[in-house]
């Protein structure tokens, strides 16, 4: 992934800066310009909470090239305290110990890197509390 | 008065036992454990490095400081495992904490002393009145060549300290540094693992620099070892800090709270700073705490702190070192070799 | 809108076609379809293909394939909606003729998937690159997360998923164009390697090369020229959020519900009037969810329906008589058109051993990504 593509996403990936539609009570990460629910254009910036729970999850055993060293690794859809959802890896756990509804905290980790000489891309992952 | 207003340590959850490494290389585990006074060490997850460890430790420090991150005017990270040779670690951490762009950033490297170096500069930036708050971090995912005695100790973790003038937790009473050019341990540009001078790293490097810096510091403070409540030295293994403490006239009880190396290993730039956090975790208002680091090359930085009443208010706002040491998951040597990238793969 | 019909079809056997290039596969399938339709004119070409740029580094397929068919200078374009690319190409042909712009159109789908070692990465480009794929999720992973929740909410069993694969492999044995023409057992599915828990290798459609084509004309033209038309009585498409996590519900595919609802309204029929369906079973769980979302079964009862044999060739609603993506193979861009090929064969009584008796109305459903786009067509015997 070209470095500029990752760089553009830094506020979202490092700090969970999304936004929120007060009419629909929906959260967006990345922030959107238009609410897909009601078409509202004035959306409220919102930094998502770092606490959440697992909505559903899987364990990736046939990975994309960038993740081969970490395989097998769990991936989950996480719902944060306010009800926003995001997809991310679950770290520091035995996959067999994961459950739907499990409480997690969002931590800062390396998500991918471009081989031994490329740029290292950081972002959010979930970790069982 | 300038002092620490918030502090935090971060340790990975994976561990490897000394036995596991000793058996891999055909050494007697009991002899190694006794000789180095080590039980196990932390191992970073495959997605952890100096940047992520620094970020988590700094986040905990912010929780204890309770300040607006944007007020931090300087951020310094000391490490000998910065993920990039060229490109700072500090920018990532600052961006993750939300303290950019009005901030001064530098990465430091001075073997295992880089962390206290970052603390020293952060402290002085505040003292000089240049910035309201400054953060100094020591963190490492230490490298030790497979089969080298260093491998038993080289571990991962780090600690962050926010310096400021208001709501101080630990006042900085005195500092001192002792530095010479002594090549006892080094890593050349492009080399994967460090090399060292074997027993030369002891007497002429570790012991000389720490005792000289320690004496300078006590003299400056007009204090004797018995005036100090607790003391922390750099911990390359379990034996050295106890020994250097004896040489300076300290008792084991003064060293023990920060002597976390048997279960943590040597987190290099994060070693004595994390020992300091572990001591803060149990300290009481009024306690005098002395820290002397050591970095090969070689030099030592010394600090004397005095805990304020605020320590009791902030202690429980973030995880303590003991809690992080107790939450662990063991890996075997093969997994360790894989996640520490000691196995040659096709690109 | 004018009435539109399929008047001929052709496809090559799907599989790992080491000796055939993308253009060769397409031209072979197209020539069969043109021959089957018996036409000597093609006014336009629409090709569905998902990611030839990534898989074989070839874009600009419209011009390339028109050229190799000897059809230049007709207008020719390639359409992309991930795995629903074939379906949207069919819909484009339908709209072109329906609007009165063209009279006879060739619609095709093609994918060459075995020329690359980056299939997983290529397919993943149908998901949200920055907010799903960046985090290491794969397509089996997205459907696995749907499966886990479906099992949790509705009590769908792991064996129910396996039974979808077993059924579709059985159907595949009767389809000479299927990639896999051998039966498998539930035990074999459950013993196959995990790809993304709880999905195993035999829950996944294979990586296949292939091409499929149909010829469309207006119904009026077909009748005037003595063709064998099957009328397209509905063509509908719907979309949803690209990222699975942004949907209100994870176990209901909104685009499938909506494209089905629109298609039923357009055709004036309901799910109980459909004689058979070809649906997008890229993974076993997908067939179960889609069979619910198209209204064949109540929400949550798709697994039970498979268990009770309701979706077999002689069941209440036979699903994927061709073998589906699971057994017939899933050259992604070709899939939506291959579904039309099967429907045309079934509705003209040419489906041989897998022929569904008295089939008069068939539904085909083709889906992109984790359900961010869905295309439904309903076809009827004239």
Image (spheres, rainbow, N blue to C red):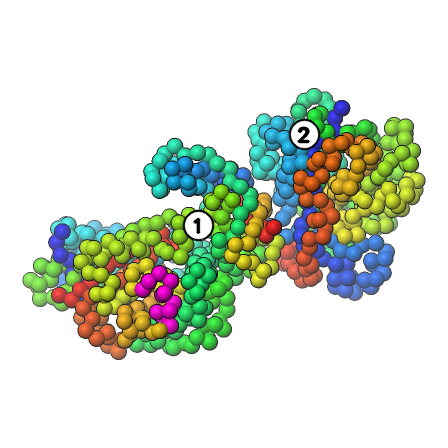
Residue C23 can be seen, yes or no: no
Residue B36 in percent (x, y) is at 83, 54
Which residue sits at x=50%, y=66%? Answer: C194
In the image, is residue B90 above or below residue C309?
Answer: above
What mark, if any, has residue B262 been given in the picture?
A: none
Pair 1/2: label in front:
1
The residue to which callout 1 is attached is C245
**SS for dot 2:** strand
Neighbor class of circle 1 (other Cα within 10 Å; few <14, some 14-19, many 20+) is many
- Which span is picked out in magenta? C297-307
In three-dimensional space, the C-alpha distance between marks 1 and 2, rounded to whole angstroms, equals: 39 Å
Instruction: Let me know if residue C299 is in the magenta part.
Output: yes
Point out the image quarter for the N terminus of chain B.
top right
Which quadrant of the rendered structure holds the C terminus of chain B?
bottom right
Pointer 2 indicates a residue of which chain? Answer: B
Picture coordinates of residue C118 (x, y %)?
45, 57
Q: What is the crowding at mark 2: few (fewer than 14 residues within 10 Å), some, or many (at least 20)? A: many
Q: Quadrant of residue B185?
A: top right
Residue shown at the point (73%, 29%) measured from the top left = B168
């Amino acid at each position: 992934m070209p470095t500029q593509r990752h760089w553009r996403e830094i506020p979202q990936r490092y700090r969970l800066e999304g936004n929120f539609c007060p009419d629909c009570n929906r959260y967006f990460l990345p922030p959107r310009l238009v609410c897909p629910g009601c078409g509202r254009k004035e959306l409220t910036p919102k930094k998502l909470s770092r606490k959440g729970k697992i909505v559903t999850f899987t364990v990736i055993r046939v990975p994309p090239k960038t993740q081969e060293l970490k395989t097998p690794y769990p991936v989950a859809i996480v719902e944060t305290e306010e009800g926003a959802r995001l997809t991310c890896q679950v770290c520091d756990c035995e996959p067999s110990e994961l459950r739907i509804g499990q409480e997690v905290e969002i931590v800062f980790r390396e998500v991918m890197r471009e081989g031994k000489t490329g740029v290292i891309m950081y972002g959010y992952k979930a970790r069982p509390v | 008065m300038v002092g620490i207003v918030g502090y935090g340590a971060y340790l990975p959850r994976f561990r490897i036992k000394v036995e596991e490494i000793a058996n891999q290389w055909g050494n007697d585990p009991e002899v190694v454990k006794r000789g180095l006074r080590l039980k196990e060490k932390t191992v970073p997850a495959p997605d952890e490095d100096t940047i992520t460890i620094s970020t988590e430790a700094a986040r905990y420090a912010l929780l204890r400081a309770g300040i607006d991150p944007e007020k931090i005017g300087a951020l310094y990270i000391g490490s000998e495992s910065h993920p990039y040779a060229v490109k700072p670690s500090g920018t990532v951490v600052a961006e993750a904490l939300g303290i950019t762009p009005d901030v001064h950033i530098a990465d430091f490297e001075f073997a295992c002393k880089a962390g206290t170096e970052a603390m020293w500069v952060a402290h002085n930036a505040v003292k000089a009145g240049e910035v309201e708050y400054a953060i100094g971090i020591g963190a490492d995912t230490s490298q030790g060549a497979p089969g080298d005695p260093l491998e038993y100790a080289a571990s991962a973790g780090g600690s962050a300290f926010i310096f400021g003038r208001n709501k101080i937790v630990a006042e900085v009473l005195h500092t001192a540094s002792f530095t010479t050019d002594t090549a006892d341990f080094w890593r050349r540009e492009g080399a994967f693992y460090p090399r060292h001078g074997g027993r030369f790293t002891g007497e002429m490097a570790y012991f000389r620099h720490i005792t000289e810096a320690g004496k300078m510091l006590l003299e400056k403070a007009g204090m004797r070892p018995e005036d100090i409540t607790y003391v922390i030295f750099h911990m390359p293994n379990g034996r050295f800090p106890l020994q250097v403490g004896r040489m300076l006239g300290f008792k084991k009880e003064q060293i023990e709270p920060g002597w976390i190396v048997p279960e943590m290993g040597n987190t290099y730039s994060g070693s004595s700073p994390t020992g300091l956090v572990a001591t803060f975790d149990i300290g009481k208002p009024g306690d005098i705490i002395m820290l002397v680091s050591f970095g090969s090359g070689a030099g030592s930085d010394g600090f004397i702190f005095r805990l304020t009443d605020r320590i009791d208010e902030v202690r429980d706002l973030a995880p303590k070192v003991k809690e992080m040491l107790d939450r662990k998951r063991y890996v075997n040597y093969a997994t360790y070799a894989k996640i520490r990238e000691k196995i040659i793969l096709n690109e | 809108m004018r009435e539109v019909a399929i008047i001929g079809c052709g496809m090559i056997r799907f599989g790992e076609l080491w000796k055939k290039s993308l253009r060769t596969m397409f031209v072979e399938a197209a020539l069969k379809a043109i021959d089957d339709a018996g036409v000597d004119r093609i006014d336009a070409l629409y090709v569905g293909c998902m990611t030839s740029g990534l898989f074989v580094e070839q874009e600009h397929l419209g011009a390339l394939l028109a050229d190799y068919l000897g059809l230049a200078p007709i207008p020719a374009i390639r359409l992309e909606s991930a795995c629903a690319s074939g379906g949207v190409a069919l819909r484009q042909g339908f709209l072109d003729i329906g609007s009165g712009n063209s009279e006879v159109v060739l619609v095709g789908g093609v994918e060459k998937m075995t020329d690359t070692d980056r299939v997983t990465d290529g397919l993943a480009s149908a998901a949200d690159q920055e907010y799903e794929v960046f985090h290491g999720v794969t397509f089996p992973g997205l459907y696995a997360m749907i499966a886990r929740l479906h099992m949790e909410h509705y009590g769908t069993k792991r064996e129910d998923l396996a039974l979808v694969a077993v059924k579709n492999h059985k159907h595949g044995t009767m389809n000479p164009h299927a990639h896999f023409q051998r039966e498998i057992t539930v035990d074999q599915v459950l013993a196959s390697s995990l790809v993304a828990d709880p999905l195993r290798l035999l829950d996944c459609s294979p990586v296949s090369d292939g091409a499929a084509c149909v010829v469309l004309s207006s119904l009026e033209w077909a009748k005037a020229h003595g063709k064998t038309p099957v009328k397209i009585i509905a063509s509908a498409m719907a979309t949803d959020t690209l990222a699975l996590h942004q949907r209100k519900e994870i176990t209901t595919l909104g685009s499938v519900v909506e494209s089905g609802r629109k298609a039923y309204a357009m055709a004036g029929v309901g799910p109980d009037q459909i004689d058979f369906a070809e649906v997008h079973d890229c993974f076993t769980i997908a067939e179960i969810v889609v069979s619910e979302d198209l209204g064949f079964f109540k929400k949550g009862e798709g697994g039970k329906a498979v268990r009770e044999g309701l979706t077999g060739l002689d069941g209440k609603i036979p699903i994927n008589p061709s073998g589906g993506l699971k057994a017939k193979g899933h050259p992604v861009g070709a899939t939506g058109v291959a579904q039309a090929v099967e429907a045309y064969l079934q509705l003209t009584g040419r489906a041989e051993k897998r022929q569904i008796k008295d089939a008069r109305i068939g539904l085909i459903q083709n889906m992109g990504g984790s359900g961010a786009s869905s295309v439904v067509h309903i076809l009827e015997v004239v």
